[in-house]
Amino acid sequence: MKLPIEASDDDGILTKNGTMIYGKEDDAVTIGVQPLKDETGNVSFEGVRTLITINESTASKEYTFAYDLPEGYSLITAKDYYRDIIDNEAVNENDYDTGEVYIVNKDNVIDTVIDAAWAVDANGNDVDTYYVVNGNILTQVVNFDEKTTFPVIADPSAWKIAKCAAAIGLIVAGTVIAAAKVAKVVKYIKTLGGVKKAAKLVVLAYAAGDAKKYARHIGGSFKNLCEIILGIDTIKSQCKF
């Protein structure tokens, strides 16, 4: 991943917590890059957080990340990914757009998840933000305005997904379950906050011993998701530790 142009002319400073900071305090924008590790039971998700700190209104509203991907891999928004899979005019795309961006392999299976875009100002107010994908280039647009209090923080975080999350993605992209159920699975994934968060809950369900009982205890979309996927061999083999 190549950082936005705001970081291109800076060697960066390594902080004590392992974050590399590009830019100076009085710059309109500074960029931080931080390694991430999210552990759930015996499952570890590894990733990288890019902290965009927008210090003033003269800064750009667009921050571009170019990805150097292996042959056959590509970037795709969740909206486009699920639209291609579901291919059902009766389904409202807002029901399944998680806001994420995926890196998929040549078989259209999710390899990396880029969390949904978010941005907040100095008062903790949400700032309108979204991703645009053009080929292997991801751009985060941050629409601050005259009401925004600076600095604004935006945080596109990318995760190399673990086996369980990949298995859920494979179920969605494959032919293991009926198309009508695929639409439901995707809707439940969105409600749970995306593929990565859904996978963490599935791992916890198996770790509890009785996965179905745990799912019923959690209830809601998670229970409904588990009713569809827990009996699938790929899910059991990749999510149970």
Image (tube, rainbow, N blue to C red):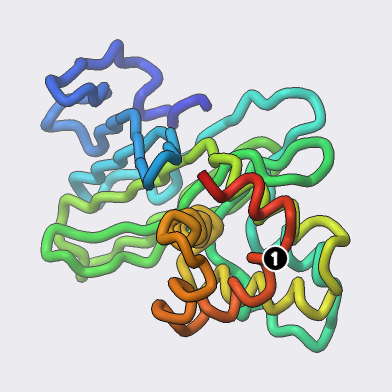
Local packing at callout 1 (Cα closer than 10 Å; few below 14, some 14-19, many 20+) is few
User: Which element type, helix, strand or loop, lies under badge 1?
Assistant: loop
Q: Quadrant of residue 118?
A: bottom left
Residue 45, relative to residue 93: is it above or below?
Answer: above
Q: Nearer the viewer, residue 235 or 107?
A: 235
Q: Position of residue 76 (x, y in %)?
A: 68, 49
Q: Residue furthest top?
A: 11
Q: Is residue 87 left or right of residue 131?
A: right
* Residue that appears at 39% across and 56% down: 142
Total labels drawn: 1
Answer left or right for 201 relative to 106: left
Q: Which residue is mark 1?
A: 231
The residue nearer to you, when weighing 186 against 130, is: 186
Q: Name the one closer to the observer, 6 or 214.
A: 214
Q: Position of residue 33 (x, y in %)?
A: 32, 29
Instruction: Give x and y (percent) for residue 151.
Output: 17, 50
Which residue is at 63% across, 77% downward?
Answer: 227
Residue at 64 percent of width and 65 percent of height: 230
